[in-house]
Amino acid sequence: MRKKVSRCFAGMCLMVTWTLGGPVVAQTPRPERATVVEPESKAVEKKSLDPGLEAMLKASRAAEEPPVFQETIQVAEVLLDVLVTDREGRVVTGLGLDDFVVYEEGRMVRPESVTFYGDPASLQASGSGRSDRFFLFFFHHEKDQSGFQQSAENRMARDAQKWLEQELLPNDQVAVLSFDFDLWLHQDFTRDRAQILKAVNDGARGKRTRGSRGDPAPRRVPAARRSLEESPSLFAELPWGREFRDQTRTFQEALEMVAKAGRGVTGRKNMLLFSSGFGQVAGIGELQAASQIYKRLERTLNTSNIAVYGFDVLGIRSGDPRLASYGSLATLSYDTGGRYFERDTDFLGPLRRVAAESTGYYLISYRSTYERGESGYREVEVGTPRGAYFVRGRTGYLYGRLGY
């Protein structure tokens, strides 16, 4: 009987190919060729071969063309990053292989390894022993600002800067973007606190800065060419010029493009998304996007290992997050392993909760197979035996050709 587990999600997967077979040559002795003697006559009637002899000749010809068997199965090493907390919201440490259960498409699979990342010491260490946390501030502004919205944004900017001053750890990497009519790039991943504070203030208040429209100026060297001590680049993975503008005409397009760029940065990325929701009005206090648009966006974020923490700027209620319609800010947050926050009196409290639960996560690996040439999306659940702890992560992962 399948045990009930806490819902979780899957992250990026590393594709590894196994060769199952090569050319196989059939070793069959060649029979002597048979000779058929015909009578000397102008009206010669061709005789048919003996059935047994004809079968031997066909077998001989087949032996000269040995069959070739090609590999048909791909093997994927699936990597799941999950947050594990107790009832008080504290990060749980010290868990191993026997403390997790994993289901892929409803079938139980056994984890091969479990590693914990982000203990307090490694978050402040230097060199190869350090662990980085990645925070991506994304401010979504309404095109027509009301006085109430401007007031909310001013408070959002103050609380975000206060959090950065009080909670930011030495190895935290922060990038900043915003969207109103277009996508604006304020700051690539960096650990420079002064640059982060300025970028967050500009992004939260919707201030447009020179070089933030996808121009070459803010671009960084690709992550693969940077040393361990340097910051990886999100902006270097984004398209340029007209392609950049054409792919960011709507907020959902911009969000999806940023998610694709996140594949170039290794590790879990926490997107702090300040928004009043997106999509079309579906009811009182509820927004939703088209089903296919939402599914593509959710799967891209999951595959890129980005967890969305949605901060509802105007307090839009999406109902029960588990039952909310496609496209709601709440649903996207929970489907990517993050959390949804309704605006109460400030943003500082929710930001502190994000920092507290991001101090450590587990990376779980297991192997999965699929037919060569296939691609798709597989749903994953992770939990602990008897539901001892709360486990959060991703809903699944793309396999095969990613399709973007």
Image (cartoon, rainbow, N blue to C red):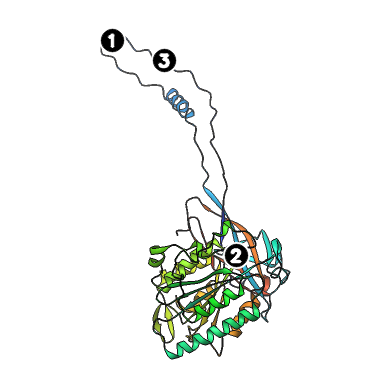
Sequence-wise first label, 1 or 3: 3
Pinpoint residue 196: horizontal percent, then vertical percent. Answer: 57, 75
Viewer-nearest of discs 1 and 3: 3
The residue identified by callout 3 is: 35
Residue 374 shows up from this direction: yes
Q: Which amino acid does label 2 sit on?
A: Ser
The quarter of the displayed image where residue 247 is located: bottom left
Q: Which residue is drawn at 40% across and 84% down?
A: 283
**Which disc number belongs to residue 303?**
none
The residue identified by callout 1 is: 41
- Do the numbered discs 3 and 2 sit on residues whose CB atoms are within 8 Å? no
Q: Residue at x 44, y 62 (%)?
A: 239
Query: From mark 1 to mark 3, how far is it between C-alphas?
Result: 18 Å
Q: What residue type is labelled 3?
A: Thr
Residue 64 vs residue 138, the one in the foreground: 138
The quarter of the displayed image where residue 391 is located: bottom right
Residue 353 vs residue 37, the one in the foreground: 353
Q: Which residue is drawn at 43% across and 62% down?
A: 240
Query: From mark 1 to mark 2, how far is it between C-alphas?
Result: 93 Å
Q: Which amino acid does label 1 sit on?
A: Ser
- 114 up-or-down from 312: above or below: above
**Which disc number belongs to residue 231?**
2
Q: Residues within 10 Å of mark 3 (few under 14, many from 20)?
A: few
